[in-house]
């Protein structure tokens, strides 16, 4: 979670926003805070969906393993569903922004006196950055989490699941 949030935040600060210095607190702290909060939600949802689905489908997974599939093939659909669940809050926020709701950062900038066009540009940047960071974090969490559910001989580790 921290790796994806920090990486995407540094990339956004250095390439897109470009403050001098790149770690200027007025930019870095709010952006990293938003990234961490949203990435944490995505990672938690995806790992919850992953472990719950593997527990529910453990017999199917073990049958697939016995028939010769690798652990990646045996849980491929579950991993895709877990990724989709982790990304859903970010996708919904992007779909509703400006139409149904006015996001907090944009509203704060407008109330502080920024021109609405500038506030909208920053909000679009922040939403895209959050989505990329959440996607990267969710991808890493699902990849690492699903691998931890199997041992070195590609057997499902039921002791790492809770029912």
Image: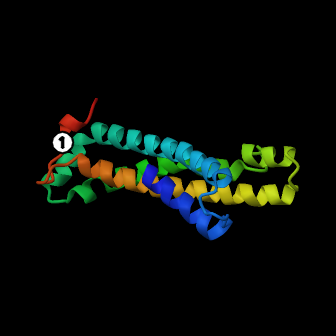
Q: Position of residue 40 (x, y in %)?
A: 49, 43
Q: Quadrant of residue 129?
A: bottom right
Residue 29 vs residue 153: left or right?
right
> Looking at the image, which is closer to me, 87 or 76?
87
Render colour scheme: rainbow
Residue 135 in sight: no
Specify the farthest residue to the top. Answer: 163
What crowding class fits label 1: few (fewer than 14 Cα within 10 Å), some (14-19), or many (20 or more)?
A: few
Residue beneath label 1, please? 157
Q: What residue is rendered at 50% in x and 53% in y?
A: 5
Specify the farthest residue to the bottom. Answer: 15
Residue 155 vs residue 108: left or right?
left
Q: Position of residue 132 (x, y in %)?
A: 54, 59
In the rendered picture of this protein, how many numbered marks are placed on residues? 1
Q: Position of residue 105 (x, y in %)?
A: 73, 47
Say if 73 sits above or below 1 in the image: below
> Looking at the image, which is closer to me, 84 or 33?
33
Q: Position of residue 100 (x, y in %)?
A: 77, 44
Q: Secondary structure at mark 1?
A: loop
Q: What residue is rendered at 80% in x and 45% in y?
A: 107
Residue 10 in sight: yes
């Amino acid at each position: 979670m921290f790796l994806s949030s920090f990486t995407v935040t540094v990339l956004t600060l250095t390439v897109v926003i470009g403050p001098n210095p790149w770690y200027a607190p007025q930019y870095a702290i709010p952006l990293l805070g938003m990234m961490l909060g949203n990435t944490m939600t995505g990672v938690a949802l995806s790992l919850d969906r992953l472990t719950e689905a593997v527990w529910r489908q453990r017999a199917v997974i073990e049958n697939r393993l016995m028939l010769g599939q690798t652990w990646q093939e045996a849980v491929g659909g579950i991993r895709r569903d877990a990724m989709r669940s982790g990304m859903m809050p970010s996708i919904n926020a992007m779909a509703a922004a400006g139409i149904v709701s006015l996001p907090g950062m944009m509203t704060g900038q407008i109330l502080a006196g920024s021109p609405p066009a500038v506030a909208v540009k920053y909000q679009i940047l922040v939403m895209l950055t959050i989505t990329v960071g959440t996607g990267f974090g969710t991808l890493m969490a699902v990849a690492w989490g699903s691998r931890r559910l199997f041992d070195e001989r590609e057997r499902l580790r039921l002791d790492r699941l809770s029912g």
